[in-house]
Structures are given as C-alpha cells and as structure tokens.
Amino acid sequence: MVNVLTPEATERAHGARSAAPALDSGGRARRRQAVVAYLFLAPTLLFFAVFLILPLGFALLLSMSRWAGFGLGDIEPVGLDNFTGLFADGSTFLTPILTNTLLFALGTVTLALAGSVLVATCIDKLRFQGLWRTLYFLPIVTTVVAVGNVWKYMYEPGGLVNGVLNALGLDSVAFLQDPDTALPSVVVVQAWASVGSAILILTAGLKSVPGSYYEAAALDGAGPVTVFWKITLPLLRPSLLFVCVTQFLAGLQSFALITVMTGGGPGDATDVAALEMYRQAFSYGEWGTASAAAFVLFVVVLVVTLAQLWIFRRKGEDA
Amino acid sequence: MTPPRRGTAAGGLSRRHFALTLPSALLASGCAAPHQGTGRPGDPVVLTLLSHYASGELKEALQGPVDEWNATHDRVKVRTKAVEFTDLLTTFMVRQAAGQGADIIHPYCLWNGQLVRAGVLRPAPAEHAEEIRRGYGKAAVGAASVGGNVYGYPTEVQTYALYYNRRLLRGAGIGSPPRTWRELEEAAHRTTRRDRYGNTLVQGFGLSTYDDSTTVGQTLALLNAAGGTFVSADGRSTAIDSPAGRAVFDLEHRLVTRGASAPGVNVYKAFPSGQVAMVISAGWWTGSLQPLMGKDYGDVGVAPVPVPEAGDRHATLSTGFMLGVNTASEHPREAWEFLHWLNTEKVSAKKGTTATRMSALQVSVGSLTGRADDMRTLLGKGGDPNLHPFLDALAYAVPEPNVPGAQRAKSLLRKNIEALWTGQQSVDEALRTTRRQVDQEVSRSW
C-alpha cells in the first residue's frame, strides 16, 4: 500500500498549517483589544474602587467594629454587637427611629404621588404647560435649608398657617412643637418640595398615552372618571413606578429637611435613621453603630424597592 | 534573566497582592505623620492650635497673644487653625484619623471623656496639673479633668443664672427676682399672657426646645440648685432619678401644663423682644443681648438660679472649654510651654492690675475664665453688673458631666425632657426612661 496524498487531503493539511498562525494572531489581537479596553476603563474603575468599593468595605468593617473615629489603629472588632445593639431592649432605633423613617417616606410618597397625579392631569389640559411645570418645579431648585426655614416660620405659633387658622376662628396649633403633629407637618413640606419632579415625569408620561384610546373611550361614552381610572392611570404605570421608587428612596434617606425644621424633636417624634446615623458617628463617636444602622437602612431600602417593583409588575400582569 | 511571571504588574507585584495592597496603601497614606515645620535642623518647631475661634472678635482675640508669642519666641512658633463650633468635634476626628491632628486642641469639656477614651488628649504633666488645680475654680478644674486626671488649661467657663425682665416683673407687681422655686412659679404665672387663640404673648418662664443650652442647660442648673447631679460621682450611672430630679421635672411639668411656659417659643428671640419674663441661661448671652436690645438692655437683670426652699445653698451648672495637648503631637513639651505662657503668666491689664493673657482675652469678648481673681480684677466695679452673678457662681457651680458618652447622655436627657414638656411622657416615665437609657449609655462607654 502506498501512501498517496489526495488533492483534498493536501488542501486540508495546508489549511490546518495556515489556520494556526491566523488563530494565534487573532487571539493576540483580542487580548490587545481587551488590554486597551481595560486601560480606557481604568479611570472609571479606579474611581469606583476609591469612592464606592473602598468606602463600602470600610463601612462593612466598621459595622462589625467599635471605632471612635479618631485613629485607624483603634478599630476594635466586635462581631455583630452593633447590629444586635440596634435592636436591643431600650434601643430607640427600631421604635421610634425606623418607624418614623418608614412613616415619613410613606407619607411623603402618598402625598406627593396623589398631588402630582392630580396636578399633572390638570396641567395636561391647560395652555402654557411649560409655565405651569416650571412653577411647580421651582421648589426643586430651591435649597432645602431655605425651604425648611420658610416653612418653619410659617408653622410657628404666630406664623402664616396659624394666622389663617385664627382668621377662620380656630385656635393655634403648635405644628412642630406637638409630637402628634410634628412628623405630619414635615411630611407635608417634603411632599410639597418633591412634587415638582414628580409632575415633570408624570406630564411626560401623559404625553405618551396615545390619543386614540381617549377617542375610543369617548365613542363608547366613558366619563372622565372612568377614563382616568381605566386608561390614564394604567398607562401611566411606568412613570408612576419611577416616581414611587425615587420618592421612597428620597424619603427613607431624608436628613436635611428634618435637621433644619425639627432637629429630630420634640423628643424623638421626628427622629429618622439618617439623622441618627449622623449623630452616632459625628456627635457620639460611635462609628460602628452608625455603620450598622446604615446597613440596616440599606436592607430596608432594598426590600421596599423590591416590594414596589413586585407590586407594580403584578398589577401589570393582572391588567 | 528570569522572565516575569504571567499576571504580574508593577515590577513583580501579583494582581492579587496589588488588589490587597491598594486599599491598604490608600488607608495608610491617611495615617502619615502630621507636618511639623520644615524638619530642617535649626528651623523652629511649628505647633498647630485648632479651635472654634473662627471669626470676628474671637479670632482676633486669640490671634493677638499668638502673634505676641511668635514675635518673642524664635524656637517654637504657633499657627492657629479654626473651624465653626458645629464642625469642631468632626474636625478633630477627621484630622486625627488622617494623621493631621493639631498639636493643641480646644475642645468643649463635654467631649473630654470621649477624647480621652479615644486616646486623643494627653494628661497634663504633673507640674501643669498642679498649677491648674491651684489657679482655677473647682468647677473649671472638674470640667478639664477625666477620672481624676487633669487634661488641659480651662479657658472659657460659663455658669448659668436667671435672666429676668424687670419691666415685665414690675408690670406684674413683682419688685425683685425670685429666690425660691415657689416665688419663681408665682412670678411665672403672674407675668404670662396669651391672646384669645392661645398664642403666647408673654411667657412667664422660658422653657425652650431650641437647643441643648436652653433645654438641658437650664434643667441641669435647676437640678444642681436642688442639690442633685445628672451623673453619679463615678460617672458610670445617672443620678437624675432622685428626689432632686423628680422635683425639677415636676416643676417644669407644672410650668408647661399650667401655661406659664411655652416650649415652642424660641427664647433667644422672644426674651430680647420682651416676650419672656424669666429664663435660665449662661453668661455668654449678656454679650449678645446688649447690642440686640439696645437701651432695653437696662430692663434685663441677672440673679442666681432660684433654690427649692429659702435658705438652701446656691448651686448651678457650669460648662466650658479647655486647651489640651494632642497625644499625637511630636512636641508636647513645647505645647505645654506655650499653654503655660498663655494661661498662667500674668501681664499688665487695665489700671496697673495684672491678669493672664487668657483671662484678658475672654473678658475682651464678654466671657469668663475659671480664674476668679483675674475676673474680679478685669471686670472691676465699672463693668456690666449682670456679669457679676455669673462670676459669683464660679464659687459654687457644678461642672457639666464629661464622662465618656456624655454627649449621648445629654442628647438622651434632652429627648426625654422634651417628651415630658410635650406630654408624651409623665414625670415618672421621663425619669425612668432617662435613667434606663443614660445608664446603658454611660456604662457602655467606659
């Protein structure tokens, strides 16, 4: 038997010999591309490492340590003590601080959402919509300190709000001094201050609702209330979800407005998690407790956000 | 030559090592030693002094003696750094953690326990401690001490007394300020006025939730006047749940529920406007009231904090600041030398008298130091008579507790006082809750 190479076999053998260097050069090119890509990404990755990953890791370390905030060498591991301390008997973190935080966020979202849906629907039917949107957006571009101080004066016993009540023949209300009214009073301000951005998003959402739906509803004889409940609201769901999630996040992390208006008082009637974290770290030197509280708040924020996503998705499937 | 191994970077450092080293290096870079002058042989040592004398007359008042020191001392120079009081503790923390802690710091004495526990304050050397104990009043020394050790030279000392509006008291038929709690309550009720909607026109006795000074300060001043203390002698528990504490809480509760006090009113605005008849506050306020009230300041009088019963011994609260030396300072001897010069050396003051530079500095900004002899010399007979009750109080004032966790304990007390005033808690509940919360805090902090 004689070994004879057929032309096909010869071509295949040539092909195999020439493909190997091609593959090598292709791999090298891809590696070079990857290196270049990483080099381009490096500044961003470094930024994230320094300003996100490193602080996050440090906060996690602190949440399981005791540290007064003065010397890095004094960090003392304590395991989960900071977390258990937050929920120990006598601790005010769960009640009233976390409860206040949730009530504050819930109240803000409810008021802001209801108000913004109402106002956005009205604006959608008005002329000069840009002007109205700008007017309602003004509180957003105003500093929180100014907003808080103006409302604080308005709530004072001799302030505008009590002046109106007195003019109506009603007694004055100590809005920010009475523990029963202090939190709702601040909720109203937070909702007022954040309603502008919600209106902006919802009016954009309303614009995206096809007019043919309204025409069909009109032909079917549907009234304005039916149209609002059956067409407008369901089709606004993505915008509502966005507003709901962002408002909840802002409410759960609220700090500046409460600091300006009540400082957490009277007593701890308006004390919220972010304010307590600030005090624990910067006033009391309990960085471990503050970091543990931050992680607990993170879990709360995550759960609340996931719950909202789930509820809105389920509603979508039902519809 | 051995080729570099795969995956190495930066001259042989593996990726894993690099990943581990980067955060450590970034953290460690913050722990570098503080800058102490140029470090060249023969160059002067530069000490940094961090205080809250950040603006206006306070900044100038401190800069004067510092400039004098720098002009007369070649070997050691002092450089001042200042931040607002609200940022002072945070700045101590951040600079200390970054290895940039000042050589000399000027803390509020309430923080001393916290600073000592964190190893920031260096105990005063024996000769300085002895000099401080000898030269200052008991309250000032107590405020500058933790666990029996002295940690610095007391600077600004504030005592609490009763401010009253003569015109409002006279209008209610009261000729002299109250001396007992019974007289205080009676005067408060007689001077209170409200409109038909319940708005306060004149508050008889100013109880305010505005800040720690008005909420906690006046409560502790009344507590001390009743013979009580906030924290036990060993600093490991609270003594608020005592007959004296109950008496104070009862008094404040009565004043609020019977309408003589309106905690929602900011007394710092209302008193100068003639809308508060009486309020307990610290001596620094006189300096603010004078320009604010103009000729109406003549209506303002100051008297010792009333005591529960006639014949009881006077007592009140004192708070203050001190100048101490950082444990991280590389030149503690020079720092103490400067502090000794600033706080104990007598220089000529007015009319041939002498006083320390710090005493002259404090009086120039309307404040006091714990050196009663200096204060009497500097205030003399021609000064504001309203300052004298605060000066007299230096002899009997009780220092604000400064145990580790004191700031937290003070905040807890404030919350419970506010809960009492606003009807969220009864006197019993407020005392019980304060004791439970503060005990837990101060015992944990040691």
Image (cartoon, grey):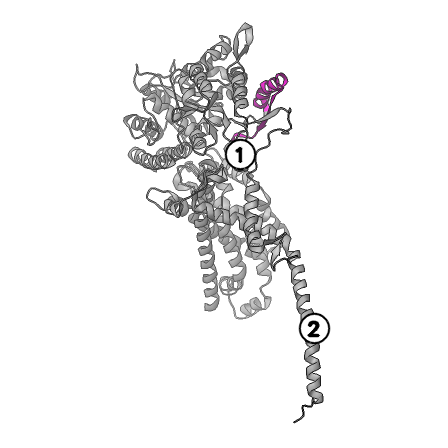
Relative to B222, does residue A60 appear above or below in the rendering? below
**For this rendering, which residue is in front, A291 or B341?**
B341
The C terminus of chain B: image quadrant: top left
Instruction: Point out the stretch of residues depicted in magenta.
Output: B56-85
Instruction: Name the residue beneath numbered marker 1.
Output: B91
Q: Secondary structure at mark 1?
A: helix
Q: Chain of mark 2?
A: A
The residue under the point 47% across, 33% down is: A158
Q: Position of residue B364 (x, y in %)?
A: 55, 16
In the rendered image, the residue lying farthest to the top is B352
The N terminus of chain B: image quadrant: bottom right
Residue type of the residue flagged with mark 2: Ala
Task: Give how far apart the Cα atoms at labels 1 and 2 are.
Answer: 62 Å
Q: Main secondary structure of the magenta part?
A: helix
**Residue A165 placement: quadrant:** top left
Viewer-nearest of discs 1 and 2: 2
The local crowd at label 1, few if under 14, some if 14 to 19, many if 20 or more residues have their Cα within 10 Å, is many
Instruction: Name the residue beneath numbered marker 2.
Output: A22
The answer to whether one can see residue B239 in this image is: yes
Residue A23 is inside the magenta segment: no
Residue type of the residue flagged with mark 1: Thr
The residue under the point 58% across, 64% down is: A209
